[in-house]
Image (cartoon, rainbow, N blue to C red):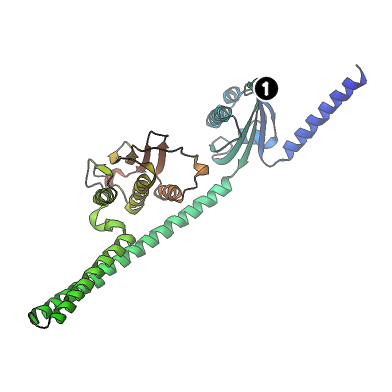
Amino acid sequence: MNDDKINTIETDISSELQLRTLIEAMPDAVIFKDGQGLWLIANKVALDLFGLQDVSWVGKSDRDLMALRPEDVKAFEMCIQSDESAWESGETFHIEELVFSKDHPRLDMSMTKVPLFNEDGSRKGLVVIGRDITAQKQMEIKLWNNSIYTEKMIEKERASVSRDLHDDLGQTLTALSFEVKKVQNLVTGTVPAVMENIDAIFGYIDSMTTSIHRIRTTLKPLLLDELGLIASIDLLAEQLSAKSGIEIVFDCPCQTCTCVEESIHVFKILNEALNNCLEHSQATLITITCVRQVDNCLFEVSDNGIGFIYPSAAKIKSFGLVGMKERADILGARLDIRSAINKGTVIRLYLPYKETKCAF
């Protein structure tokens, strides 16, 4: 063997040692797989994550390792699915995954997967980097709990102010209207200017009554406590249809659904969905439905508009969509948005219900 070949081999060995030293020093799990998904390199963090410290893992696929670690089947199944998604994307792929295993009851992982291809387009290898974000997620849960509490307190205060407007100012205006009516009856036929002033007072009373109703509607949309969720949605659809000229059909098989405890969040999600349809979709028909499913109350808003390319959850920038997602999280519900160019948009809210509270 000549000196050049020896130097090349030594360089390759040195490079591999440097690479292994580098990935072992990383706090994240690092895995290199070949084009067939066989494990070639993994650092200690990755081996600990999958419980492979005492397993002969080199040259094995996730399915092979699944057989060796049956207690971690779910974790390997997630890997197989997200690996394939990375290959299909053809670019750096990000995903958050829950890892359940014997050694780790629950880990929240942020996974980055980089597919590598040969010149002919065939699969060459896959770089996988996983970061434990469990502590971050736990903090997010605490923040969400605080958000839920704050939201409830705000809505409670809004409802209180709304009732005060109705009970105090509303009743005072009603009494004032009666008193002015008495004065009007006493001065009938007298100076025209007096009658004009009385008519003006009635106009001010009507204007104030309208303003109070508008403020109450803002504080507690459509007075949900008085009308109920279904009647409020029905009225909203009627009002928006009359205002926009777009046909909005509301279909609910049960007009007395009581399975929704935090109805204001459902109402605001549907309201935002309708506003998005009216503003962006160019639709001629919008349909709202609510039906009972096995474990959920399903609320759906669909349109026959131009549609759009819906981004991944991590890339949502619209404040409206973000707000809908946040309210769904507060409810413990799942928000699903499906759209395609020239095929309209469907927004579904899957809301868990309690059997004893649902009147479907």
- Dividing the picture into quarters, in which one does residue 188 lie? bottom left
Say if 173 sits above or below 45 in the image. below
In the rendered image, residue 111, in percent from the top left (x then y), is placed at 59, 37
Say if 259 sits above or below 122 in the image. below
Residue, x 39% and y 62% (percent of image)? 154
Residue, x 67% and y 22% (percent of image)? 119
Q: 232 or 38: nearer the eye?
A: 232
Amino acid type at image mark 1: Glu
In the rendered image, the quadrant that contains the C terminus is top left
Q: 344 or 333: nearer the eye?
A: 344
Residue, x 33% and y 60% (percent of image)? 218
Is any part of residue 35 visible from this angle? no
Is any part of residue 319 visible from this angle? yes
In the rendered image, residue 153, in percent from the top left (x then y), is placed at 39, 62
In the rendered image, the quadrant that contains the N terminus is top right
In the rendered image, residue 145, in percent from the top left (x then y), is placed at 46, 54
User: Which residue carries the number 1 mark?
Assistant: 119
- Dividing the picture into quarters, in which one does residue 43 lie? top right
* Helix, strand or loop status at disc 1: loop
Q: Residue furthest right?
A: 3
